[in-house]
Amino acid sequence: MSMINYASREINCKIVYYGPGLGGKTTNLEHVYGKVTPDTRGKLISLATETERTLFFDFLPIDLGTIRGFKTRFHLYTVPGQVYYNASRKLILKGVDGIVFVGDSQIERMEANQEAMQNLYDNMAEYGYDLTKMPFVIQYNKRDLPNASPIRDLQGSLNPGWEVTDPTRMRITPDPAHAGENLVEQLPTGEWIERAPYFEAVAVTGDGVFETLRAVSKLVLKSLA
Amino acid sequence: MPVGAASWSFTEDDFGAITSALERFLTDCNARSALLVDRTGQLVATCGERPNFDPTAFATLTAADFSANDQLAKLIGENDFQSLFHQGEKESMYLADIARRVILVVLFDNRTTLGLVRLKMKPTVMELTALFEKVFSRASSGNTPNVLAGADDEIDKLFQ
């Protein structure tokens, strides 16, 4: 739920990083915090357990620039990865404007990824939000690990595409981030499908972190335009 | 099914009405400052003494506090808690729901009492509820100016 404040000339938007436990959601925020200049970001708030697992959420406010004289302020949140914290996961999704799903590329985490993705769909539906119609990007993290699954497998499992029902959207839309791939395309069966934009990342070194953030923020602002 | 959460905006006139209601309230009850936070954790307005903490972080934690307490209320068979009170040694805070979308937070010290804050808060909550209901009904009717309409090029430029 973006909020436009005409008095302070600010547009405030909320982005949530979602995904399985230990997948790198907090690491994404820590990298952003470390790289942006202090005058464009606020405090990084972490409500974590003693073992540094996110208990409630991490939070980082950042300014991304000015459009039409309005400061664009993004509030970045992460949710706890563990399923037994679902009550707090759900609370964080309230009023969300854009979602980043941080998947763990390791083969043995595939099931945890699928479980988290299903849980995301379910929690969004409970609020009455349709994930397929809002700003949503996927980040495949930990691409540097030797046991990382091929992108094709991750895409097949987590981002197989949803059916496009709106005739105005039934046209091939190339993926600007991956040459030769499409975000919207027609299957040999005649059915049109759309996939969420995806990015490869190594969040501990920062690879792909800003590409992901830029993509989702842009989608959020475009959804308001 | 709606796409996602609807956006809402408030004008300088709304802001003027909100702050004048808050200023009157602060004078009446002698509290230090008042903050309005929306339920998603965004700071809407502050009034009174300038807080010496990070108001953005404060707003986020306030919304989380209120949301968590809403869930606690449901567990004990209540719909929600209309207000919350946190008592400190010197500083205390009182939080109240406004139109189910906004939270009013009042910070006060020993120059006043909880009783007086609660007493004076009631009409302020009613006044602000009426004001915000107007703002939200304008947002849901789609009758708000869209500041970003046609700004696609500018958005593209921002991310180049």
Image: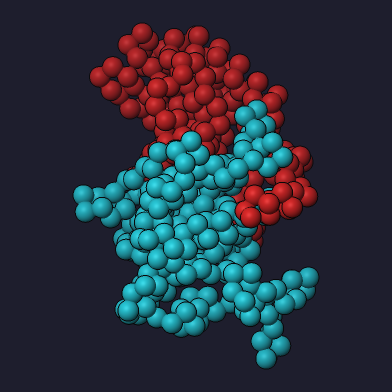
For this rendering, which residue is in front, A94 or A184?
A184
Q: Residue furthest left?
A: A50
Question: Who's the residue at 60% across and 51% down the image?
Answer: B5
Quadrant hosting residue A44: top left
Query: Above or below — where is A158 with respect to A214?
Result: below
For this rendering, which residue is in front, A222 or A214?
A214
Is residue A224 shown left or right of residue A118? right
Quadrant hosting residue B100: top right
| Circle count | 0
Visual colour scheme: by chain
In percent of width and height, residue B156 lies at 68, 54
Is residue A35 shown left or right of residue A69? left
Question: Who's the residue at 53% across and 60% down the image?
Answer: A211
Query: Above or below — where is B23 with respect to A191?
Result: above
Write down which chain is painted cyan.
Answer: A
In percent of width and height, residue A176 lies at 64, 69
Residue A145 visible from this viewpoint: yes
Write down which chain is painted red.
Answer: B
Question: Who's the residue at 63% across and 55% down the image?
Answer: B160
In percent of width and height, residue B137 lies at 69, 39
The quadrant of the image that shows the N terminus of chain B is: bottom right
Query: Above or below — where is B41 with respect to A132?
Result: above
